[in-house]
Amino acid sequence: MNQRALRDAAVRMKPIRKAIGRAKTSAWSLGIFAAFSLIIGIWSPSSLIPGAVLAAFTVQEFRGVGMLQRLELRGPRHLALNQVALAIAIVVYSVWHLWLSLHDGGPEALASLGDPGTEKMVRDMYRAVSVSLYATLAVVGPMFPLLTAWYYASRRKRIDALTMNTPQWAVDAIRDAT
């Protein structure tokens, strides 16, 4: 009876373990991008704000990992909301850079090209590439975090099924093992 309860709990835990793995991967990925942005911020202060924002998302993602590992019902919602906020941040960042691309003359280095015709051509090319890049990022960028948010939210019913249909001692044993 005890071994069967543990086997059933292990089967119910499998999708939760996958979610924990995905959340860890997400947290570490966010952390790496945050670190790169903050390091680049040494030379380009405009990278400090995105780096700090990514660092905040990293902290919240790791908090969500801990909640999943403890089989807390609020863990999936916490992770899902963090991903929705990340999607919003991607859109805000993209729109901000899109606006800058349309209203800024481009990199200051272009002012020293010497030939007005060449400067105009390069500025127009810079603007076209920037607008294309940030418009695409604004549309495509949020898709992955939003799908990830949906995935995390769907794990709540798995945690609920595990905790409601498994003896408490087996849940404790599974919780201690993760």
Image (cartoon, rainbow, N blue to C red):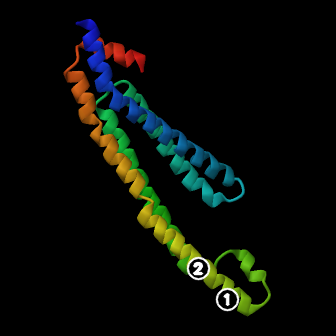
Residue bearing mark 2: 127
Q: Is residue 104 something that shows in the picture?
A: no
| Residue at 38% over, 35% down | 19
Q: Quadrant of the N terminus?
A: top left
Image vertical order of residue 89 relative to residue 148, above or below: below
Dot 1 falls on a residue whose secondary structure is helix
In which quadrant of the rendered view does residue 152 lie? top left
**Is 102 on the left or on the right of 46, as rendered?**
left
Q: Amino acid at mark 1?
A: Lys
Q: Quadrant of residue 9?
A: top left
Q: Quick check: 164 above or below 108?
A: above
Q: Residues within 10 Å of mark 2 (few under 14, many from 20)?
A: many
The x and y percentages for residue 6 are: 30, 13
Where in the figure is residue 161, as x and y percent of width and height? Answer: 22, 27
Residue type, label 2: Arg
Local crowd size for mark 1, using a 10 Å CA cut-off: few (<14), some (14–19), many (≥20): some
Residue at 36%, 53% in the rendered image: 146
Q: Is residue 25 above or below residue 96?
A: above
Residue under label 1: 120
On the question of residue 178 being in view, the answer is yes
The residue sitting at the top extreme is 1
Q: Which mark is residue 78?
A: none
Q: Is residue 45 left or right of residue 161?
A: right
Image quadrant in which you'd find residue 43: bottom right
Measured as percent of width and height from the top left, residue 114 is found at 80, 87
